[in-house]
Structures are given as structure tokens and as C-alpha cells.
Image (cartoon, rainbow, N blue to C red):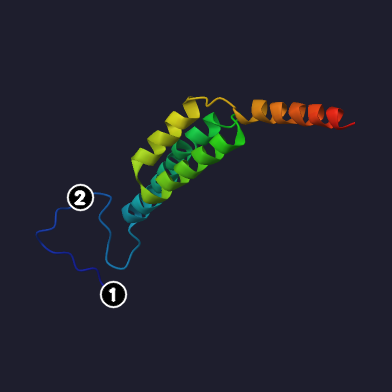
Amino acid sequence: MDKVINVKTPEHLPSFFTAPGETDGLFVGVVIFMIALLLAFGNIYFKLHAIPEKMAHGINSIQFQLVGILSLLALFTHNNLFWVFALLLAVIRIPDFISPLNTIARAAKRLSDRRDN
């Protein structure tokens, strides 16, 4: 088929103009760029939501689980208040009250076992 060019068309068209039926290189490039950008922002978003869990990794298990639950709630509901609470809970160290009470209970049990003999 013979290429019919309009008389008013300038001689030098920009390189991003494509002829009918040809592949649009600029469109393909922009689509690839947008997919890469979306993956990069998704990766940053997930790493941001994992910060409180990484901070709370060495804490007792109950506090670590609460931080994890709050982080997941923030991730799925897009409610930033849950993420702020998780971050604050990860920073604040809640004292372990259970271990001393368990030690006292074991000592009292041993004392009562001695008196029974």
C-alpha cells in the first residue's frame, strides 16, 4: 500500500509519532516504567509496614504478637492509627510481670512440698 501523507504534514515529525499499524514504542516504554514503579512503591510500602515488627523482635512474645496484629490491621485497613500504635508499642518496653510471679509460685510450691514431708 502506498503511504499517503497529508500536504500540511511537516517533513520532520518527532520520533514518538508512529505510523498506523506499527508498535508504539513510547507507550510500551511508559507501561514498563509504570509497572516497575508500582513494584518499587509496593516494596517500599511493605517494608514500611514491617518496621514495628522488626523493632519488636526481641520483646516478649505477647507484646510482639500485639505489634504484629496492629501492623497487619494497618496494612489491610489503611488506617494509620494502628501503625502508629504498633510503632509506639514496639518502642515502649512493657515490663515482664509474669516471670517473677511464676518464680514466686514455684518457690511457694516447693516450700509447701517440704512442709508436707
Tell me the amino acid under the disc marked 2.
His
> Which quadrant of the view contains residue 107?
top right
The label number, if any, that marks residue 12 in the structure image: 2
Residue assigned mark 1: 1
For this view, does 111 lie left or right of residue 42?
Answer: right
Furthest-right residue in this view: 117
Residue 61 image offset from top left, x and y in percent: 61, 36
Q: Nearer the viewer, residue 23 or 52?
A: 52
Image quadrant for the C terminus? top right
Query: Mark 1, residues whose alpha carbon is within 10 Å: few (<14), some, or many (≥20)?
Result: few
Furthest-front residue in this view: 116
The label number, if any, that marks residue 23 in the structure image: none
Q: Nearer the viewer, residue 96 or 14?
A: 96
C-alpha distance separating marks 1 and 2? 22 Å
Q: Is residue 25 visible?
A: yes
Tell me the amino acid under the disc marked 1.
Met
Disc with the residue nearer the chain's start (1 vs 2): 1
Whether label 1 touches label 2, CB < 8 Å: no
Q: Nearer the viewer, residue 4 or 45?
A: 45
Residue at coordinates 81% horizontally, 29% vertically from top-left?
A: 110
Residue at coordinates 38% horizontally, 47% vertically from top-left?
A: 33
> Which quadrant of the view contains residue 95?
top right
Residue 100 image offset from top left, x and y in percent: 66, 25
Q: Secondary structure at mark 1?
A: loop
> Which quadrant of the view contains residue 56?
top right
